[in-house]
Amino acid sequence: MRAEILSIGTELLLGQIVDTNANFLAQQLPTLGLDLYYVSQIGDNLQRLRDAIRRGLERSDVIICSGGVGPTEDDLTREAIADVLGETPTVQPELEKQLREFFTRRGRTMPARNVKQATTIPSGTYLPNPIGTAPGWWVERDGKIIVAMPGVPHEMHKMWEEQAQPRLAKLISGGVIFSRTLKLAGIGESHAEEALGDLTHSTNPTLATYAKSDGIHLRLTAKAATQQEAERQLEAFEPRVKERVADWVYGGESDSFPAVVGAILRERGLKLAVAESATGGQLASLITEAPGASDYFVAGYVVYSAEAKRALGVSPEVLREHGTVAEATTQALAAGARQASGANVSIATTGNAGPDASEDKPVGLLHIVVDIGGRQVCQETRYSTTRTEYKRRGAQEALYLLWRELKRAA
């Protein structure tokens, strides 16, 4: 079956955001046996949307839309689909009730404009959105399928995985599709694919890699006549995958890396402190994303200046001999943070986020030290990226180094 993707939103055409949704969907469609023929970007214009949908119905079997299902005047995907099919949208009382309850749970009253999100057409039904206010549409007419989903990536991903993908799989193959996710830290996508080797070419189950902000995600997907059979396929396949990337697997779909590290600290009764220069507080922010972080996280020090580093215990001699960006300085910061806070474990960072070289230290240099009860592990890393991305990646790498050392100390 032929498929095409319509990415909807004027912001795409202006280059204000990158179309990651189309990239995600393009990787997903082959697992369903769908051949992707076209990918288009359309602005928030009703006539151009009508034209794109009408053209898609002429040349494709499945049209997948992302964007334009919000409540504002320029969210026009529903209107365009209804116009092309000659059908009139009507409000679905049960869906409207769900939307109003969504707002009530957040202590708000639903604006009148959101009522249009509770509409469907005779040839369609709505796709629930458990994490947002924009339900999707599933439309079947004259042997064609139109799927409309939100443009917000995490909402679209969840709706695809829980609603659209299973429906398409059952319709196309008469069976079911079942997926699991494994999450990796401390390894890049190309190295992960190299480690996985021939498993990335498996056809059923399939294995796909995705670079995400919290590491590499591996999506394992099986197709079978029943869910039980699909699950059995994955139960046989997953151990083979884990064996190849055992050093980097930290969890599954619902696991966050900060929470996984925090669980180890909590289980062992350890207390953590951080001293940050290069990462500027990003590491403490990452650690405290996990609920209950106060069980193990004692203190975070942002020691940007030489004076602040001296106040945390870095000696004038170390600063004079090595400078503010150096392994020795980072070691002294890690020891100082651990001692000042009374923690068992500490992490320290120094580096140069750029854009200019400092103290003859190259842009992108990052020193990380993990201190577990006085035993220190040092790592030097270099990034070629923006200051914001440098801090984000540096914090992730520092937390990974702690996780690795905690596992080794088990």
Image: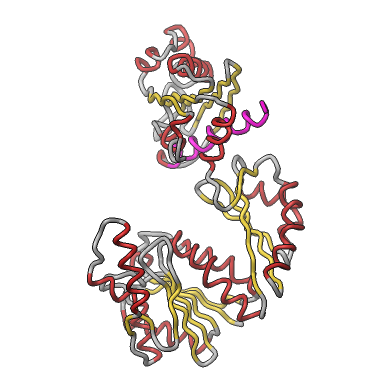
Q: Residue at x 46, y 32 (%)?
A: 363
Foreground of the two, 4 or 122: 122
Q: Quadrant of the C terminus?
A: top right
Name the residue furthest top.
317
Q: Position of residue 215 (x, y in %)?
A: 56, 46
Residue at 66% over, 59% down: 220
Identify the image quadrant of residue 232: bottom right
Nearer the observer, 252 or 266: 266
Is 120 on the left or on the right of 378, as rendered? Answer: left
Is 102 positioned to the left or the right of 399 in the image? left
**In the rendered structure, which segment of residues is drawn in magenta?**
389-410
Count the labels in the image. Answer: 0
Q: Quadrant of the N terminus?
A: bottom right
Please determine whether, in this image, residue 369 is positioned above or below residue 201: above
At horizontal 39% and vertical 24% (from top left) the residue drawn is 301
Image x and y of residue 22, in percent: 49, 67
In percent of width and height, residue 256 lies at 52, 45
Place residue 234 in its image quadrant. Answer: bottom right
- Residue 112 placement, left or right of 169: left
- Magenta part, dominant SS: helix
Tell me: residue 269, above or below residue 313. Answer: below
Q: Nearer the viewer, residue 138 or 213?
A: 138
Point out residue 86 in the picture as x, y percentages from the top left corner: 37, 92
Does the stretch in magenta take in 245?
Answer: no
Indicate whether 205 appears above or below 341: below
- Magenta span contains residue 391: yes
- Measured along the vertical axis of the image, is residue 79 above or below residue 367? below
- Tell me where residue 52 sits by quadrant: bottom left
What residue appears at the point 46 percent right and 35 percent down from the top-left corner? 287
